[in-house]
Amino acid sequence: MERLSGQSATDLDRAAELLRKGRLVAVPTETVYGLAADARQDAAVRHVFTVKGRPLLDPLIVHLPSSPLPAKEVEWPEAARLLADTLWPGPLTLVLRRGDSCSWSPLVSAGLPTVAIRVPEHPVLQELLHRGPLPLAAPSANPFGYLSPTTAEHVEEQLGEQIDAILDGGPCAHGVESTILSLVHPERPTVLRPGPVSRETLAHVLGLEVEQVTRGPGRGAADPQLAPGQLPSHYSPHTPLRLFPEGAGASLDPEPDTARVFLQRPSGGSPGDLDFWWSEDGDPVTVARSLFALLRRLDRDPRVSLILAEQPASLEGLEGALRDRLSRAAHARHS
Ligand code: AMP
Ligand code: MG
């Protein structure tokens, strides 16, 4: 595995060369690190699924240097143009209908007549995408179901042996995955995954109501045709994780092998050895940035056999995205 620097033009050239040859390179994005392959090469895309242990029914996001795209690749409704003009580059993924002669591997769509695309903002990834120009299929660079990686070290720990290179672009600015918006029915835009771009922002740009797919009680995943890959259990540490409601931390009486994670530094009294917090003041941007990294650290801590984590109360905006990730992280696998 080659360790490449996002600051070096030679290393960026090398990453582009590997990708053109059908090899896999982990890349920084402003959300989380991605495991990238040239979206046009079937074998390379298939290899991404294999390395992650990801089911072929879970489609991938294609990352592009810029928009709009030729109609042969995707259908491009007016709503997509509006959002692209206003919010790209940025942490927003759009699900659109595939064009009639789309040049990307059918595997990125997992058999659906649609494709998810995004123009990312991270300067290192922008440099790389423009070098091709390459459309890059890139899911998060972690084993399927585990916490997402937000540094190059996280990727190396878990996938270092199985991939060709890691392009280091520093820690990710957002720390949670992109907002996914389906425009398959442009008059009924629907958020499939909450993220850094809020529903309110989307509604404001579009001048339309924006719906949100929710998991009904006992229904498990949302409609797999509409929102494939949105499993109730995802982003999980191996150590059991349970949630407590925002503000209820003081009433917990944890066992000695239990870590408590708060949204902000607990006030009053001195914190215990196994008390942790994602931010000093509860700012959701800071919480998101350290969300996965702290859970990862606790997952490796031999003192910890249970993690109790504080879940934000709000369903909206970035806090809604944090709530979503924590619910999935705490949802026992195979249940
Ligand atoms: P990630 O695993 O973070 O790369 O995100 C990929 C997720 O995007 C998948 O698990 C799906 O939930 C969603 N996605 C990708 N392509 C599509 C599509 N064509 N239709 C609906 N959702 C999609
Ligand atoms: Mg993922």
Image (cartoon, helix red, strand yellow):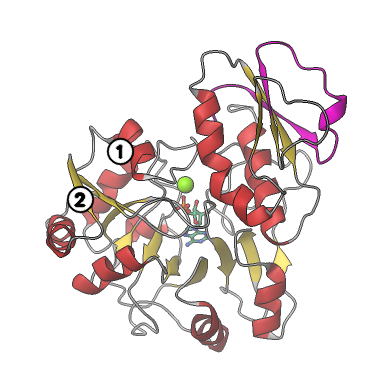
Per the image, label 1 sits on a secondary structure element best described as helix
Q: Judge left or right: residue 22 versus residue 223.
A: left
List the residue tagged with mark 2: 4
The correct choice, above or below, for 270 with respect to 103 in the image is above
Q: Is residue 169 left or right of residue 118?
A: left
Q: Is residue 222 visible?
A: no
x, y percent for residue 300: 48, 22
The first of marks 1 and 2 along the sequence is 2
Q: Which callout, 1 or 2, points to the residue nearer the camera?
A: 2
Q: Position of residue 200 (x, y in %)?
A: 72, 72
C-alpha gap between disc 1 and disc 2: 20 Å
Reply above or below: 320 against 252. Answer: below
Q: Report the side of 118 relative to 86 (left or right).
A: left
Q: Which residues are magenta?
A: 235-260
How busy is the neighbourhood of tag 1: few (under 14 within 10 Å), some, or many (20 plus)?
Answer: some
The residue under label 1 is 51
Q: Amino acid at mark 2?
A: Leu
Q: Position of residue 260 (x, y in %)?
A: 70, 26
